[in-house]
Amino acid sequence: MHPPVGPAWLVALELSGLGDAMRRSAWMYPIVEIFHIVGFVILVGAAVMFDLRVLGFGRGLSVTALARHLLPWSWAGLALVVPAGLMMFTAHATEFVTNPAFQLKLALLATAAANVAFFHLGPYRKVRAWDDAGDAPGTARAAAALSIGVWIAVIICGRLIAYF
């Protein structure tokens, strides 16, 4: 391990008991990473299934019924991803903040969050018009396509962090 250099709060995170345990334990980091990956599978799987419905696949399913079914799964995935990601961050905080793949991953996560907000505050407010039949409006389809692309890019960046 390199000596942590950078902003005091990042050095403190890295030198914390959790950061130290994450680096020293042969099993802690890999186990936490597995929880992070499983969380992403759940979160992204639910998001992509919903996005595909908005794009016109599975027209026999109501958009709102599918949303009610998948949203709890998304929250469950998020409940695994966030704490696991924060735990992994503590192990290498000063390195990660300068890692281009990590920086891009954070920017993409912000983009995904903004896209979700746009979708739910915009096109989804009029879902009754296209819930069971008919095509979703172009803005809804664009948000769904963007969502799929962004989540794939987040996964790619997460994997590339180890190589930068």
Image (cartoon, rainbow, N blue to C red):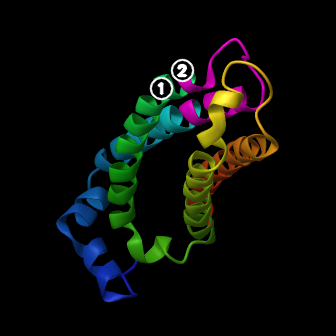
The percent coordinates of residue 56 (x first, y second) are 78, 25
**Image quadrant in which the C terminus is located:** bottom right
Answer above or below: position of 141 versus 72. below
Left or right of 94 on screen, residue 114: right
Q: Can residue 1 be seen from the camera position used here?
A: no
Answer above or below: position of 102 versus 131. below
- In this view, the residue in front, 117 or 44, is 117
Q: Secondary structure at mark 2?
A: helix
What's the distance in space between the residues labelled 2 and 1, CA to CA? 5 Å
Report the amino acid beneath label 1.
Arg
Q: Can residue 56 be seen from the camera position used here?
A: yes
Numbered mark located on residue 95 in the image? none
Q: Secondary structure at mark 1?
A: helix
The percent coordinates of residue 129 (x first, y second) are 70, 29
Residue drawn at 56 percent across, 26 percent down: 64
> Which residue carries the number 1 mark?
68
Numbered mark located on residue 65 in the image? 2
Residue drawn at 62 percent across, 60 percent down: 111
Within 10 Å of disc 1 (Cα), the crowding (few <14, some 14-19, many 20+) is few
Magenta residues (range): 46-65
Q: Which quadrant would residue 63 be assigned to in this image?
A: top right
Q: Are marks 2 and 1 in contact (CB under 8 Å)?
A: yes
- In this view, the residue in front, 119 or 161, is 119
Answer above or below: position of 63 versus 141. above
- In this view, the residue in front, 63 or 157, is 63
